Image (cartoon, rainbow, N blue to C red):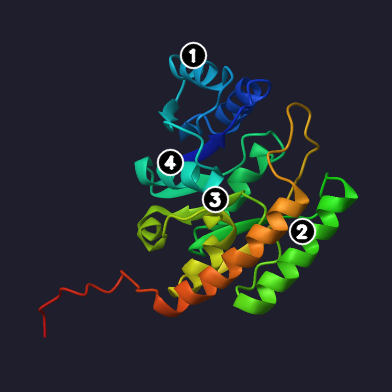
Amino acid sequence: MRVSIVIPFYNEEESVEEVLREVCGVMPDAEVLAVDDGSDDSTAEKISNHAKSSNVRYLGMAKNCGQSAALYLGLHHASGDVCVMMDGDGQNDPADIPALLERSREMNIVCGYRKTRQDNWQKKVASRIANNIRSSFLQDGVRDTGCTLKVIRKEHVKQLVPFNALHRFLPALLKNAGVEVIEVPVNHRPRKRGISKYTVAGRAWKGIYDLIGVSWLLTRQVTWSINPYSTEV
């Protein structure tokens, strides 16, 4: 099973090298796609330097387009049979990847959920409320879509539609297309370097618009695993 690991980075010059070393140490045979999301610090340079002597591939966005856009780019450039997604801030633990990959042998998509979150109480409360609303509204059966650590099969990437916040609604889109989803607990670590790119208030208002848009999209989604051009009888 060929594995590709997609990691978006935005202004993570303080942590990017440590994250890449750790991932390569845990998964030395995997293809690692490090996507620079238009950083204006030395993140891109450090990724490029690391890529010269490892299994890391550098992908760069011309401008900052957001985490979902960076993940989408990486997924489409991945050459593996399965794709692992994780954050570039060091809070996801690469040691969880082998267990998620093992579960992916029986399920199409494996979603990590942060059993013990290492964030401040405002983020924890806001995330719990948002996840409860989303889960009740979309019935996606996932308790923590904010956890980027997920595994999907490359064949299902074509079911994804590029839009901001895609990574939070990815399970809903795939489940609506008939893909089986499972959640497993994963480790969550405190952020040691850099700053969060999200604010609680900003995420809340955008989340409302996203929820309305995704609800409409799910009613119009086409399952491309069925060939619409087939002429076989």
Q: Specify the label residue 127 is tagged with.
A: 2
Location of residue 202 with respect to 159 vertically, above or below: above
Q: Specify the label residue 128 is tagged with.
A: none
Residue named by callout 4: 74
Location of residue 128 with respect to 11 vertically, above or below: below
Task: Name the N-terminal-most of marks 3 and 2.
Answer: 3
Residues marked 4 and 3 touching at CB (< 8 Å): no
Q: Quadrant of the C terminus?
A: bottom left
Mark 3: amino acid: Leu
Mark 3–mark 2 distance (CA, rounded to whole Å)? 26 Å
Residues marked 1 and 3 touching at CB (< 8 Å): no
Q: Kindly state the secondary structure of the residue where label 4 is placed.
A: helix
Q: Specify the label residue 49 is tagged with.
A: 1
Q: Residue at x 46, y 34 (%)?
A: 33
Q: Kindly state the secondary structure of the residue where label 3 is placed.
A: helix
Quarter location, residue 74:
top left
Q: Where in the figure is residue 213, as x and y percent of width and height?
A: 52, 69
Mark 1–mark 3 distance (CA, rounded to whole Å)? 28 Å
Mark 2: amino acid: Ser
Q: Residue at x 49, y 13 (%)?
A: 49
Closer mark to the observer between disc 1 and disc 3: 1
Task: Name the N-terminal-most of marks 1 and 2.
Answer: 1
Residue named by callout 3: 101
Closer mark to the observer between disc 4 and disc 3: 4
Q: Kindly state the secondary structure of the residue where label 1 is placed.
A: helix
- Give the side of residue 105 with respect to residue 155, left or right: right
Q: Does the image show residue 97?
A: yes
